[in-house]
């Protein structure tokens, strides 16, 4: 079956950096768009970033643009989220998701598979 396993979360001070990884199995990774979403306590899940199947195109939420970078390694079936200049408002559970559409997708319903999430906490 399809598995998406996130790692790399943790506690970091404001201004610091973290790199999240998501290892995928059981799906045709190289033809899937891969996205990152996050959910803070008491808030709805929100889109963070997406990368197309080829890796040539990316798209970011305005709140993270210029600070976060999404990338992928199709040889390793892994997608990454480099997070720099972290702010307390970035605190959330971060989820990796896969979309069979392959192209830029920013709505959660456009993703068929989800990981369990990894906690990111940014202290002020």
Image (tube, helix red, strand yellow):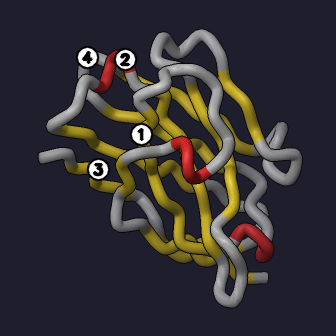
Q: Which residue is mark 2?
A: 31
Q: Residue at x 79, y 73 (%)?
A: 89
Q: Which residue is mark 4?
A: 75
Q: Nearer the viewer's eye, disc 3 or disc 2?
A: 2
Q: Nearer the viewer's eye, disc 4 or disc 3?
A: 3
Q: Nearer the viewer's eye, disc 3 or disc 1?
A: 1
Q: CA distance from mark 4 to mark 3?
A: 16 Å
Residue contact between numbered discs 3 and 1, judged by CB atoms under 8 Å = yes
Residue 75: x %, y % from top left: 25, 17
Name the foreground residue: 5 vs 43: 43
Q: Which residue is mark 1?
A: 98
Q: Nearer the viewer's eye, disc 2 or disc 4?
A: 2
Q: Earlier in the sequence, mark 4 or mark 3?
A: 3
Q: Which residue is mark 3?
A: 4
Q: CA distance from mark 3 to mark 1?
A: 8 Å
- Mark 1 residue crowding within 10 angstroms, few (<14) / some (14–19) / many (20+): many
Q: CA distance from mark 2 to mark 1?
A: 10 Å
Q: Residue furthest front?
A: 109
Residue contact between numbered discs 2 and 4, judged by CB atoms under 8 Å = no
Q: Can you tell which quarter of the image residue 46 is in?
A: bottom right
Secondary element at tag 1: strand
Q: Earlier in the sequence, mark 3 or mark 1?
A: 3
Q: Residue at x 52, y 28 (%)?
A: 71
């Amino acid at each position: 079956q399809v598995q998406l396993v996130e790692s790399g979360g943790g506690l970091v001070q404001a201004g610091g950096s973290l790199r999240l990884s998501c290892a995928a199995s059981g799906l045709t990774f190289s033809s899937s768009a891969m996205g990152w979403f996050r959910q803070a306590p008491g808030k709805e899940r929100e889109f963070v970033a997406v990368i197309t199947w080829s890796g040539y195109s990316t798209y970011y939420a305005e709140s993270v643009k210029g600070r976060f970078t999404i990338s992928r390694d199709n040889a390793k079936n892994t997608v990454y989220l480099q997070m720099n200049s972290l702010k307390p408002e970035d605190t959330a559970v971060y989820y990796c998701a896969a979309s069979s559409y392959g192209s830029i997708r920013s709505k959660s319903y456009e993703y068929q598979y989800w990981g369990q999430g990894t906690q990111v906490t940014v202290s002020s």
